[in-house]
């Protein structure tokens, strides 16, 4: 089974991506959480365009993906789990948990370091919040993220199957928690104990700086609770909260060309993690 999963990794990932994208898009259409500010035709071509651009960029720059790095590390005995005699279940579970924690830390870092924030803010500059926002990242951020992931996989000694499981979970939950779909409040409170829900992550896309700098998890919600970055609800409520960033609110900035040049535009003021409520929203720019 492990060999089958490893050999068919691209097909598995693409199938899960396409299936979840369709399912969540239909859910959004049937039970939207918020009214759209812009039509899908205004935003989706650019958001899907950046996905295609990122896919080509990663393939050109990296001769091997994270799964390939795991196979190489296993062959050469690199990394923690290749050096200790741990049962297979612990190696698998430990690898997924560590990788998820590192993604949380990376996300915090991309908010805390001004230069990295200039890259990451393109993700936050989307003026609506839906399933396609979960795949909207600048190519330079994607390349840096892949480099970090390759190093992490080698240091951890994560087996290839664990990397595949992690990446499928991460891609799937990123689409889920960016979905603009309504979930019953009682169900949401239970779900967010084990997974980041749309209502939990939507707070992170608020235009208010203290709300933007919260709820950094993509997959597991525990890291935010452990490290004090969890915020249950936006102050204005989900229907009334402003999505996006103060400096990037023009419709033309939703175009693909603007997405690509956005990190090189004006800096947009200072930035800090967990800025106190009531300070200027200019920090979340």
Image (tube, rainbow, N blue to C red):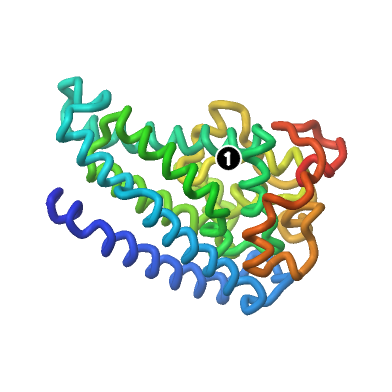
Task: Give the residue drawn at x 23%, y 27%.
Answer: 78
Residue placed most toward the observer, 231 or 56 = 56
Residue 179 is situated, as x and y percent measured from the top left of the image, at 55, 61
- According to the picture, the residue beneath numbered tag 1 turns out to be 216
Q: In which quarter of the image is residue 241?
A: bottom right
Residue 35 is situated, as x and y percent measured from the top left of the image, at 71, 70
The relative height of residue 213 versus residue 168 in the rendered view (above or below) is: above
Task: Give the residue drawn at x 81%, y 52%.
Answer: 246
Q: Quadrant of residue 115?
A: top right
Residue placed most toward the observer, 199 or 142 = 142
The relative height of residue 1 versus residue 79 in the rendered view (above or below) is: below
Instruction: Determine the residue located farthest toward the top in the rendered image.
Output: 84
Mark 1 lies on a secondary structure that is: loop
Task: Give the residue drawn at x 47%, y 66%.
Answer: 52
For label 1, count other residues whose C-alpha is less than 10 Å away and answer few (under 14), some (14-19) or many (20+).
many
Task: Give the side of residue 226 with respect to residue 172, left or right.
Answer: right
The relative height of residue 175 versus residue 83 in the rendered view (above or below) is: below
Residue 199 is situated, as x and y percent measured from the top left of the image, at 61, 52
Task: Give the residue drawn at x 81%, y 53%.
Answer: 247
């Amino acid at each position: 089974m492990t060999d089958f999963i490893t050999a068919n990794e691209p097909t598995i990932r693409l199938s899960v991506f396409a299936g979840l994208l369709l399912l969540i898009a239909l859910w959004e259409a049937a039970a939207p959480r918020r009214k759209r500010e812009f039509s899908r035709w205004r935003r989706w071509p650019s958001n899907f365009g950046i996905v295609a651009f990122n896919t080509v960029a990663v393939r050109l720059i990296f001769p091997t993906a994270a799964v390939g790095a795991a196979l190489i590390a296993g062959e050469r005995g690199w990394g923690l789990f290749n050096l200790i005699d741990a049962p297979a279940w612990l190696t698998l579970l430990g690898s997924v948990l560590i990788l998820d924690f590192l993604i949380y830390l990376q996300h915090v870092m991309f908010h805390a370091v001004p230069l990295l924030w200039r890259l990451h803010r393109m993700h936050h500059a989307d003026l609506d919040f839906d399933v396609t926002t979960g795949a909207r990242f600048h190519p330079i951020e994607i390349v840096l993220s892949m480099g970090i992931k390759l190093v992490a996989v080698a240091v951890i000694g994560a087996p290839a199957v664990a990397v595949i499981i992690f990446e499928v979970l991460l891609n799937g939950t990123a689409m889920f928690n960016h979905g603009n779909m309504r979930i019953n409040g009682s169900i949401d409170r239970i779900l967010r104990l084990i997974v980041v829900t749309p209502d939990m992550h939507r707070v992170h896309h608020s235009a208010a700086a203290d709300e933007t700098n919260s709820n950094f998890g993509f997959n597991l919600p525990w890291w935010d609770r452990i490290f004090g970055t969890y915020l249950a609800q936006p102050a204005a409520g989900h229907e009334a909260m402003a999505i996006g960033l103060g400096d990037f609110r023009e419709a033309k900035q939703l175009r693909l060309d603007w997405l690509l040049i956005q990190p090189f535009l004006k800096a947009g003021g200072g930035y800090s993690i967990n800025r106190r409520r009531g300070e200027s929203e200019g920090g979340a720019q």
